[in-house]
Image: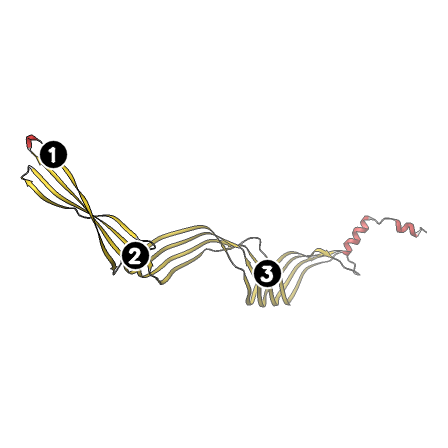
Amino acid sequence: MPDPQLVAARPLDPQLVQQLQAALRRRITVDSIAVAGGRSASVHVGRIEVGEASIENVTIEHFSSRVTCGSALLRNVRAILELHFEARWAYDLKWFGSDQGVKRLGSKAKTIPLHEIRIPVLRDIEVEVPTVEVSDITASVLPVTDVALGAAGFTGLAIERTRLPSSGFQVSGVGFASFEISHLGLPDADSAQLTIDSFRPEAPLRLPDIAIGNIDIPEVAIPDVGSPEPVTLLDIQTETFEAPVFKIGEFFKVHFVVEPVLHLQIGELVLSELRANASIGALRIKELSTPVSLQGVRLGDLTLGQLSVDGLHV
């Protein structure tokens, strides 16, 4: 009879060790799980995190605007009138010769105070822009919290190639090599609650193109608009006055010429009774994508109908 100490010291057969480990660790593999339909009495999302959204293109079509001005008031207006005098002469003595010239006689300036000038009616200002395109836009969207969607139903839930659990499980007091179930059918199942702590898709959420048409911006009243600085209009040319003062037939002529130049200085230009309205034919947002993360998803009173499990292996 062998010595018990020698038997205890003898190493175990590696194949036997593998068999023992396989007996203690099992994994269930399910080929497919199908649920024909189900219903949740309540759907609640604790928080929806929306990352920085990127917009490929925004197109504004048929933008038009109209600005209506009731009147204009010119305050502290004064005119500076400059008169430039000259004499233009010419003679023609046929065979003896001819000549002509201009003699400057100096100038004189006069300031004329006009005080206030009111222009009662001004024409409307209309702006038409056929199309405006803006590309590569980013936007920050605040998270949405406590979203309650009420009850919800679903159909056609299918799960393929499931391992329960992924790292295997241990069975004590039961020994078996393996077993296989080709099909397991259950009429229904229910759960008090299904909770998902966090759900974050790897791919960003891409929304279809958004088109909003016929946008009318209501008419708004604009406070009186005044010029921040005085307005000066220089060198306003007017018609030249010319009068003959001396003439001897076609032989000798002298004309007296006055050339007026007007300057206007306006202390303040005020536009009053301003109103503006605008309209946009269509606003199109293309290629809108944003990363999303759902946290605290909870489905209460979950019911699954007609469960079908195919290919159960251990």
Check disc 2 and report the residue beneath it: 269
**Which of pointers 2 and 3 lies earlier in the amino acid sequence?**
2
- Secondary structure beneath disc 2? strand
Q: How far apart are the alpha carbons under marks 3 and 1?
A: 100 Å
- Secondary structure beneath disc 3? strand
Q: Is residue 189 visible in this depiction of the protein?
A: no
Please name the residue shown 15% across and 38% down the image.
102
Image quadrant where residue 314 sits:
bottom right
Q: How far apart are the alpha carbons under marks 2 and 3?
A: 59 Å
**Which residue type does callout 3 highlight?**
Gln
Check disc 1 and report the residue beneath it: 99
**Which residue type does callout 1 highlight?**
Asp
Asked if labels 1 and 3 touch by Cβ distance under 8 angstroms, the answer is no
Image quadrant where residue 313 sits:
bottom right
Check disc 3 and report the residue beneath it: 295
Q: Is residue 102 visible in this depiction of the protein?
A: yes
Please name the residue shown 25% across and 52% down the image.
264
Image coordinates for residue 57, horizontal then vertical, percent: 44, 51
**Which residue type does callout 2 highlight?**
Leu
Q: How far apart are the alpha carbons under marks 1 and 2?
A: 51 Å
Asked if labels 3 and 2 touch by Cβ distance under 8 angstroms, the answer is no
Image coordinates for residue 114, horizontal then vertical, percent: 23, 57
Q: Judge left or right: residue 2 versus residue 221.
A: right
